[in-house]
Image: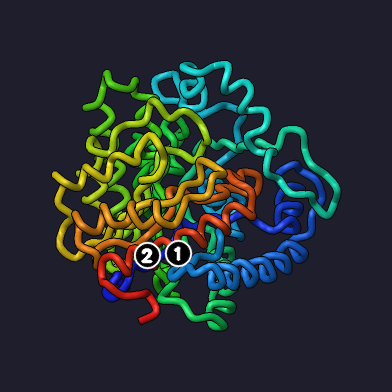
Amino acid sequence: MERSTNRILTTHVGSLVKTPEIIDQMRAQAMGEPFDEDILAKHLRTGVAQVVRKQAEVGVDVPSDGEYGKSSWMGYVWDRISGLEPTDQLPAQDGVNWFTLRAQQFPGFHRAYDRFETTVWMPDLPSGKKPQNANVLRFFVVTGPVRYKGHVAIRRDIENFKAELAQNKFVEAFLPAVAPCSCSFPGMNRYYKTEEEYLFATADALHEEYKAIVDAGLLLQVDDAILPMMYVVGAPGQDLQKYLKWAAICMDALNHALRGIPEDRVRYHICWGSQNAPHTWDIPLKEIVHLVLKVKAQAYCIEAANPQHEHEWQVWEKVKLPAGKILVPGVVTHCTNVVEHPELVAWRLGNFARLLGRENVIGGTDCGFSQGWNWARVHEEVQWAKLASLAEGAGIATRQLWGKSAAE
């Protein structure tokens, strides 16, 4: 994996706002309407080419495919794993679930937010349709052996991405994939003897996708938003040890999924959920950073611009980044449509560089800008402005840290 040897490199977390054509096809599929797989495949090829070129234009050094081939950052994998059946029941742990607990502190806010969360930035679609409630969530229970069946889909994603990468000059490139615990909600298991057995079966299945990405010459980014988010279900501030015990098992399962994959080909991403919401129940980074650093990855992509977590750059005053590792802090965020000033981006990067060493820091984003076809967190125009500001801010930080421009 490339480091910021001569300048601060830039990347992001993976998901970008999809084209109207892709959204239209995925909307029809999610709503149970007729759609054409061949038409979707055509739009995916065109869309990935466009999004890769745009990343080059705004100055991203390490791009993704925008996660264009996925219905959502985690839900996509349920189309690539066998042994699952859809259900109307929300996944629950000890009788409660994150989706209801998150609204307890701010019920009025969530009643309003849930009405527009997934539609506010949806573009006009070629079909002219715009569902009133685009918050189409699918839940599953495990009723049989979990096996990976997504070989055709991941091959399509890789081929679409690499076709356009060859036409542009990047430092390197990555594809995201979900972590075992982020698609293995407690309460889903109806087949395996224990939740842990089910989690490791999921890890075995995802290993095939991980290996396909790395074997294709791409970096693998493992996304694990659910790990920090599940602290809410464990009664925040009351049962930390119970949560940490569960989280440690999740880390073991992830490392099992990563077996045989070189650490220098892996990035691990955590955040506290992409919702533009209060986040007052988030577990502090200092409580889980020791678990994060146990993941067999070279780079760690961690949310750091969200107002609930920006101060946590100071965690690294006490926590030592292991030798050879890289931190990819989020220095622009998805949680607001305000575009970060490049000087602010440079200041944030400088804080990390002075603590960890400039060569060990790559500028990133807090989370994806669109976690699914219907989950755009900012307007597409703002997304690109933020990434351009990230690149400009990295250039300023380079001058400050090296005494030269990024072009020298």
Quadrant showing the C terminus? bottom left
Alpha carbons under labels 2 and 1: distance apart = 6 Å
| Residue drawn where x is 30% and y is 70% of the image | 4
Identify the element where label 1 is drawn. helix
What x and y, as percent, mark residue 269? Answer: 37, 51
Which quadrant of the structure image shows residue 235? top left
- Label pair 2/1, CB-CB below 8 angstroms: yes
Pick the residue in front: 40 or 119.
Answer: 119
Which quadrant of the structure image shows residue 346? bottom left
Q: Is residue 39 above or below residue 32?
A: below
What x and y, as percent, mark residue 64? Answer: 50, 65
Q: Is residue 364 left or right of residue 157?
A: left
Rendered image: mark on residue 316: none
Rendered image: mark on residue 392: 1
| Residue occupied by mark 2 | 396
**Is residue 208 visible in the rendered structure shown here?**
no
Identify the element where label 2 is drawn. helix
Dot 2 alpha-carbon crowd within 10 angstroms: few under 14, some 14 to 19, many 20 or more? many
Quadrant showing the N terminus? bottom left
Q: Is residue 6 left or right of residue 91?
A: left
| Residue drawn where x is 32% and y is 56% of the image | 349
Pick the residue in front: 13 or 207.
Answer: 13
Kind of residue indicated by mark 1 = Glu
| Residue drawn where x is 34% and y is 49% of the image | 302
What x and y, as percent, mark residue 97? Answer: 46, 24
Kind of residue indicated by mark 2 = Ile
